[in-house]
Amino acid sequence: MRPAAMSRPRILLIAGSARSRAFSARLRDVALREVEAAGAEPRTLDLRALDLPLYDGDLEARAGVPAGARTLRDALDRTDGLLFVTPEYNAFPTPLALNAFDWLSRVQAAEGAPGGMAVLADKPVALMSTSPGAFGGMRALALMRQYLGGAFQMLVLPQQLAVGKAGEAFDDTGALKDARLQQSVADIVRRLVALSTRG
Ligand SMILES: Cc1cc2nc3c(=O)[nH]c(=O)nc-3n(C[C@H](O)[C@H](O)[C@H](O)COP(=O)(O)O)c2cc1C
């Protein structure tokens, strides 16, 4: 069940990267500061720390869903909105992200806790991407929109942002050098926070 919106909405920020020092984590942190500036409560989740094996139907039949999938379910259940920053691997979102959300979709409601699909249905999500390439991962962005909006029935914000040439995009303080891109992050976050405040 969707948690009741609070006066200070909780926004979970996830970067779909499979490496440390990730560009997507840097963009996530730009967004995190804007979440704070918008008066909302940011939280982050490291998908790698969930330690989820590659989805395996035999493993699921034998041992059920791994604990990391329930950890992801709980984190998403405790948030009013999601901001997801995806890298791009061969025009796709990362296997790390897809695998985590595929496992999430297998979590069933039990002992008063909701199922994995239920915690995302009708929940707002804002999408961003970044990559060293000129297009900034926008092909992965389109697929994340389809995945989270189509399969998980999330409310995907129409506004999105792809930050290209990631190697040169951030200054020493972690901000985006291009003021228009920085403003886009702020605008998207403000819209997400406003949507996440709805009852
Ligand atoms: C398997 C693989 C495929 C990649 N494919 C693309 C791609 O299609 N488009 C792109 O812009 N960058 C691509 N890259 C480069 C990534 O954008 C780059 O490694 C980036 O740093 C990953 O994001 P992160 O820094 O958030 O981890 C690819 C990298 C890997 C490892």
Image (cartoon, rainbow, N blue to C red):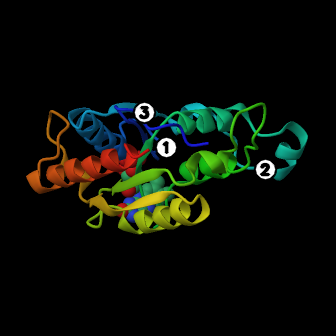
Residue 175 percent coordinates (x, y): 17, 40
Task: Give me the residue at 56% from left, 31% from top.
Answer: 49
Which label number is shown at residue 175?
none
In front: 83, or 190? 190
- The 10 Å Cα crowd at callout 3, few under 14, some 14 to 19, many 20 or more, is some
The local crowd at label 1, few if under 14, some if 14 to 19, many if 20 or more residues have their Cα within 10 Å, is some
Q: Which label lies toward us, 1 or 3?
A: 3
Pointer 3: what residue? 44
- Which label number is shown at residue 18? 1
Displayed quadrant of residue 75? top right
x then y, percent, for residue 83: 39, 47
Note whether residue 90 is visible.
no
Q: Earlier in the sequence, mark 1 or mark 3?
A: 1
| Residue that mark 2 sits on | 56
Kind of residue sitting beneath label 2:
Asp
Answer left or right for 174 relative to 178.
right
Residue 12: x, y in percent?
A: 43, 38
The one of 112 and 66 positioned closer to us in this rendering: 112
Mark 3 and mark 1 in contact (Cβ < 8 Å)?
Answer: no
Q: Is mark 3 within 8 Å of ligand 1?
A: no
Element under label 1? loop
Q: Position of residue 16 (x, y in %)?
A: 46, 47
Instruction: Determine whether 28 is above or below 91 in the image.
Output: above
Return the residue found at the far front.
199
The C terminus lies in quadrant: top left
Residue flagged by tag 1: what amino acid is it? Ala
Q: Residue at x 78, y 31 (%)?
A: 111
Q: Earlier in the sequence, mark 3 or mark 2?
A: 3
Q: Nearer the viewer, mark 2 or mark 1?
A: 2
Q: Name the quarter showing ligand 1.
A: bottom left
CA–CA distance in space, label 1 to label 3: 15 Å
Is 111 on the left or on the right of 68, as rendered? right
